[in-house]
Amino acid sequence: MAALETAGGPDCARYVGGCVRNALLGATVDDVDIATQLEPQQVLAALKSAKIRAVPTGIEHGTITAIVNSLPFEITSLRRDVETDGRRAVVAFTRDWFEDAARRDFRLNALYANSRGELFDPTGYGLEDADQRRIVFVGEPEQRIREDYLRILRFYRFWAWYGRGAVDAEGHAACRKLADGVATLSAERVSK
């Protein structure tokens, strides 16, 4: 975080997704994802300046993996989907945290925290969902699913792991309606 903020200024990078969600839920944090306003080449330069090993694991989608003390930290530039076919997306980079949050799968995964521990909830519902253990798509469920059919499987997996109470009816209905999309996914993506 310090390397990124040295290059891009205070609050140009935030922890995001599972590490924030799990920290709030008191669950084990298995991996750390970082979102940043820096574009991939800027991230590479920042890591190089800080003498941190960088692996361009998904540079076309804005993802660089930093290796620190043998631990991977996935750093992804803020982005929005320009085009998607239900499996792959063409992205454009942005500096807008709300735009990045709007393309994420579930509201409790669209939570960010800066290096000082301040929480950010761009959807306005992520913190409450985490507290209530609700799995709810960001925005329109059908749109989220059409962007990536893997989200159908993730919806039920996350509900089984973290959910309490009844499954979200709107999300469940969208998953049932678009279930045939799962057949378009590779075996590798389904098994993750």
Image (tube, rainbow, N blue to C red):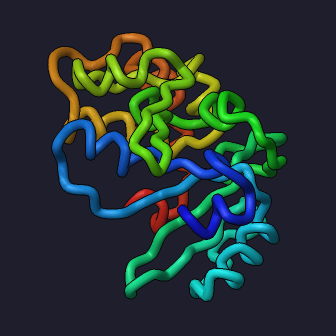
Quadrant of the frame with the C terminus: bottom left
Snapshot quadrant of residue 65:
bottom right
Query: Which is more toward the observer, 149 or 161?
Result: 161
The residue at the point 39 percent across, 87 percent down is 70
Q: Is residue 190 left or right of residue 25?
A: right
Task: Estimate the x, y position of residue 136 in percent, counting from the top left.
Answer: 40, 22
Residue 102 visible in the picture: yes
Q: Is residue 171 placed above or below 86 in the rendered structure?
A: above
Report whether 91 appears left or right of 34: right
| Residue extending furthest toward the top | 169
In this view, 169 is above or below 176: above
Of residue 23 and residue 114, the one placed in the foreground of this image is 114
Query: Residue drawn at (16%, 23%), measured in percent from left and top?
Result: 164
Where is residue 158, by image quadrant? top left
Residue 190, position as x, y percentages in the image? 42, 57
Left or right position of 137 against 146: left
The image quadrant where one finds the N terminus is: bottom right
Residue 157 appears in view: no
The number of numbered discs placed on residues in the rendered structure image is: 0
Please tell me which residue is depicted at 46% across the width and 41% down the height of the picture.
Answer: 113
Q: Which residue is found at the position 49% from the left and 34% from the top?
A: 110
In the displayed structure, 11 sits above or below 178; it is below
